[in-house]
Image (cartoon, rainbow, N blue to C red):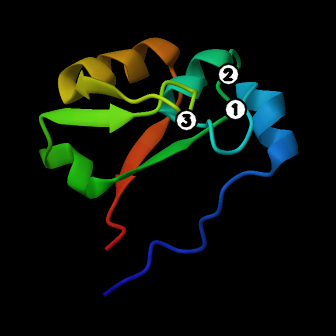
């Protein structure tokens, strides 16, 4: 099994600076706060096969279910670069 390399979450300071979110509340929906598109999003390759995706809406107390096609539309609107990685 190959490894995608060393990936880690950003520091609390960077999450606040670029996404205006605290650890535990970060999700792809936080990209809406990244007006200058500093954040590069990595997604699990297995999500490409899903019809529906579930994410926290920047609040870990809730979950939003969204069609993958609508999520990809959202990503094109916010404009951040992203890629799918084989994580396992």
Residue that appears at 13% across and 47% down: 49
Q: Nearer the viewer, mark 3 or mark 1?
A: 3
Residue 26 as seen in the image, left or right of residue 72: right
Q: Quadrant of residue 7?
A: bottom right
Question: Mark 2 — residue?
Answer: 34
The secondary element bearing badge 1 is classed as loop
Mark 2 to mark 3 CA distance (whole Å): 19 Å
Residue that appears at 36% across and 83% down: 2
Foreground pick, 68 / 75:
68
For the point 21% across and 29% down, the residue is 68
Instruction: Kindly give the residue lying farthest to the right in the view shown.
Output: 13
* Foreground disc of the pair 2, 1: 2
Few, some or many C-alpha atoms within 10 Å of disc 3 (few <14, some 14-19, many ≥20)? few
Q: CA distance from mark 3 to mark 1?
A: 23 Å
Q: Where is residue 37? Give x, y as percent.
A: 64, 25
Q: Can you say whether 2 is above or below 77 in the image?
A: below
Q: Disc 3 marks which residue?
A: 60
Count residues near mark 1 (Cα–Cα under 10 Å), then give few for <14, some for 14-19, many for 20+.
few
On the image, the x and y values in percent for residue 66 come to: 26, 23
Check the image and name the residue furthest to the front: 61
Q: Earlier in the sequence, mark 2 or mark 3?
A: 2
Is 58 displayed left or right of 17 in the figure?
left
Residue visible at 74% across and 37% down in the picture: 22
Q: Quadrant of the C terminus?
A: bottom left
């Amino acid at each position: 099994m190959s490894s995608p390399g060393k990936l880690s979450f950003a520091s609390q300071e960077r999450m606040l600076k670029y996404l205006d979110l605290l650890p535990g509340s970060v999700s792809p929906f936080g990209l809406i706060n990244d007006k200058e598109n500093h954040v590069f999003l990595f997604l699990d390759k297995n999500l490409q096969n899903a019809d529906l995706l579930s994410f926290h809406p920047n609040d870990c107390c809730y979950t939003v279910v969204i069609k993958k096609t609508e999520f990809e539309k959202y990503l094109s609107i916010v404009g951040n670069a992203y890629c799918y990685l084989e994580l396992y």
